[in-house]
Image (cartoon, rainbow, N blue to C red):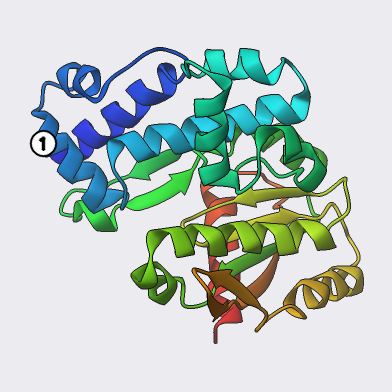
Amino acid sequence: MKKFIILTESIDFIERNLCEPITRKDISNHCYVALSTLEKLFRYALGTSIKSYISRRRMTQAAKDIANESSSITDIAMKYQYSSIEVFSRAFKRVWNVKPSEFTEKWRFTGIFPKINYEFKEGDDLYMARKRVDMSEAYDYFREHKGSYVLCFDIQNLIAVNDISKKAGDLAILETASRIEKSADDSMLLMRIGGDEFALITGLYDYEAVKDLSEKVMSKNGETINFDGEDLPLSLWCGITKIPESLRYNEFFTDMHEAISVSKQ
């Protein structure tokens, strides 16, 4: 339980300070734990280093700022504690595979690395604790589209791709988001709801139209991504659920994951 508290407190501290010049030592000091212990917790529970987690969260928030055209790219770089536009651009491209100046030409989706919330029960292993992404920003959208259909996607065999390289896994995640977004209308909302899981809030109430949309995305199954000269096939599972009329976050989150489970049967 103590490790769980340390992990959640460190994640919350990072979220509160994404626009501040925090160091890994600042985080460990805040949590009253050795830096080496905290680093091990992140690698075990999240599969990434503290530095990488901070960078990915900052680049996710930076993408939202770029999409909203709220500031210049230079100001956004400074906001997220990058000393130069060149350093920021390199960090941004590592996450999004495009330069900041090219982002809006390719993407509407911005939630590539959402904040993680944990649910932990006494006796659970830290790695097995239920991870839930923070979907609070989209609550108004959900409320406006109660009863509409949601397409829930899961990447097939992502573990095997990650075994080749974590960068290959990140490329598979980007390609998945791209395939879904290219098939979706501008009014639809794409969210990442897990490590290899996505949800497309369609706003549609016609089952046949939703099924056609699903088949459009799934028609790309088996097409490859290229990583270091190697072609890797990428396929998805897809399930269908609805935004419940009595909108409760936990139930909705569970419904989406159950839809994915059913699609694998």
Q: In this view, does 85 lie to the left or right of 103?
A: left
Q: Which quadrant: the C terminus?
A: bottom right
Residue 246 vertical placement versus 2 (above, below): below
Give the percent coordinates (x, y) of residue 141: 76, 38
Question: Horizontal and vertical percent for residue 233?
Answer: 58, 81
- Horizontal side of 53 relative to 261 (left or right) equals left
Q: Which amino acid does label 1 sit on?
A: Ser
Say which of 206 and 229 sits in front: 229
Identity of the residue drawn at 71% across and 50% down: 190
Q: Considering depth in this image, is 37 or 166 the residue closer to the camera? A: 166
The answer to whether residue 46 is visible is yes
Where is residue 34, by image quadrant? top left
Relative to 127, 226 lies left or right: right
| Residue 181 spot, x, y in % from top left | 77, 56
Identify whether 256 is placed above or below 95.
below
Quarter holding the N terminus?
top left
Query: Which residue is at a point 34% across and 71% down the rendered structure image?
Result: 163
Q: Which element is circle 1 on?
A: helix
Which residue sits at x=60%, y=72%? Answer: 225
Residue at mark 1: 36
Residue 12, given in percent of the width and then of the height, sits at: 36, 26
Whether residue 145 is visible here, answered yes or no, is no
Residue toward you, 61 or 164: 164
